[in-house]
Amino acid sequence: MQIREIEEEIISEFELFGDDWEQKYEHLIDLGKSLPLIEPGYKTDVNLIKGCQSRVWMHSDFKEGKMIFTADSDAIITKGMVALLVRVLSHQEPVAIVNARLEFIDQIGLKEHLSPTRANGLVSMINRMKQEALQHLSK
Amino acid sequence: MEKGKGNTLDGPAIQRIRNDFPIFKKVINGQSLVYFDNGATVQKPLQVIQAIENYYYQSNANIHRGVHTLSREATELYETARNTVAAHFNVANPQQCVFTSGTTEGINLIAGGLSKAILRSGDEIILTAYEHHSNILPWQLHAQERGLKLKVIPLKSDQSLDIAAAMTLFTDRTKVLAVAHVSNTLGLITDLQALFKIAQQYNVITVVDGAQSSPHMPVNLPELDPDFFVCSAHKMYGPTGIGLLYMKEKWLTELPLFKTGGGTIKTVTFEHTEYAEGALRFEPGTPHISGAVGFAAAIDYMNSIDMSAIYKHESELVRYAQTRLLELPEVEVYGQSEHKAGVISFNVKGAHPFDVGTLLDKYGIAVRTGHHCTQPLMQLLGVQGTVRASFAIYNTLEEVEYFIEKLKRVITLVS
């Protein structure tokens, strides 16, 4: 699936909850719980994206022209957000990742988690995903 | 629950106080604000906001410099503010009360000044395990430069200070004891009397970080008798950017200057400067005049309620919150002693404090999460961070009740 298609899928999933933030967060937390954990060997300092409070680990591979991301966080809400980003950006071509605008986050009403003051490391995680995709752009 | 009974202020009294704070008309995530992040900074009453506004409307000028009417007015307001602060802490000579930008600057001036001339390589500075980074880093910086040694008073298993262990730390090389009056993370009140007794035997200079005691309880400085005491106005219902550095009279002349400039002098040549006497010696540059005016208004505000009443009210909130939190098996409370001021720190077992804080915010409850600028303490507790609820005079038992009810919901969501 293309990035935009997956985003649309997530948007319709979240539409079910309407304005009920509790249900939305319950879903986000469930997503976090279902995230395939990063290989313990990859949970290293090099892969650690330091947020002020919650920590995020992210590892990428490049296989058959596509980026594969695995990730984890020690905070469950952050992990839910990480799960969404991995779902959208993993198994995509580098060029699509670099150009992805990730507007779905705003559309599902979770944009507050990307504010630079959130201290959860997500903005840095997106930047790192794009940087690593960029390295494979010309290959 | 006994509402308005015991030691808390009654409903109408609290409502009158809450009406003084315009921010409580604000709606957060569709809910009225429950503000439990008072340890970080407290909200400001109209009386303080208006005092600052009036100053800029009516009296703004630079101080101690002009002969004109406005300058005299501004100078008088600034020096009256100093008198108000001094009287509040029962200090007879207002010159012993230096205005700084806040607690952190105060500690930097003390640590920097003492390290320049009084402390020698090999001298020891004693801190506690629950110090705020602002009472560690300035000492650490000079310790590294000057070969001083930092020693740390450990905590007992209930996280209270191990006074017996403290006794064994003092030696003839111990020169400074720098301690928090109240732990910003745990809320525990330090037994200063016991510590000062030993400090006196070794002729040790005592420095008290009063950032978390001054908002919550009466502080009588001559009775406490430290060499130095520092605090911040913004935690005491005043504006940000202004604080107090109190020093014993002898330090007005003996504390080496760490920072200098205009406004601190009598005469200057390129070769030599004769400094002013008293507090001005430590206040280079144009001071935060409107801040001082706001600080004084904040002190008047607290005294209109009465510090003992504030202490009783907030202690009851802490006691009640702690009792209710301890009823929840999923919750771990740190520093469970009853001898606490305004602050309670906890975690939901197995949950990241960030998640707990994020979800509480969705219910309109503002708490602080993280290490609270006490990373060494976090390492000691073996946690990444905690959730901290800290109270002020405008908080109510009903808010604590709402917080507990929503915390239970959060526990269900995260587990």
Image (spheres, rainbow, N blue to C red):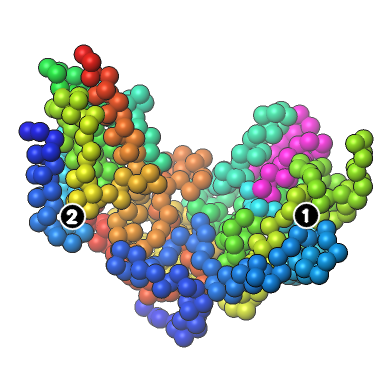
Task: Name the quarter where the N terminus of chain B is drawn.
Answer: bottom left
Q: Quadrant of residue A139?
A: top left
- Where is residue B362 shown, x and y percent of the image? 30, 60
Q: Is residue A59 above or below residue B203?
A: above
Give the magenta-colored segment's residue range.
B105-128
SS for callout 1? strand
In the rendered image, residue B107 lying in the magenta stretch gets the answer yes
Say which residue appears at 20% left-offset and 25% top-offset. Answer: A95
- Tally of numbered tags: 2
Say which residue appears at 77% left-offset and 68% top-offset. Answer: B70
Of the pair A96 and B138, the residue shown nearer to us: A96
Q: Which residue is mark 1?
A: B247
Q: Residue furthest front?
A: B68
- Where is residue B39 shown, x and y percent of the image? 51, 58
Q: Which residue is mark 2?
A: A24
Identified by mark 2, the residue type is: Lys
B38 to the left or right of A45: right
Of the pair B147 and A76, the residue shown nearer to us: A76
Q: Is residue B299 above or below residue B6?
A: above
A135 to the left or right of B285: left
Chain under callout 1 = B
Q: Residue furthest left?
A: A1
In the rendered image, residue A74 lying in the magenta stretch gets the answer no
- Where is residue B29 shown, x and y percent of the image? 30, 63
Q: Residue furthest top?
A: A139
Chain under callout 2 = A
Say which residue appears at 51% left-offset and 45% top-offset. Answer: B374
Asked whether the viewer can see residue B355, the reply is no
Say which residue appears at 31% left-offset and 39% top-offset. Answer: A122
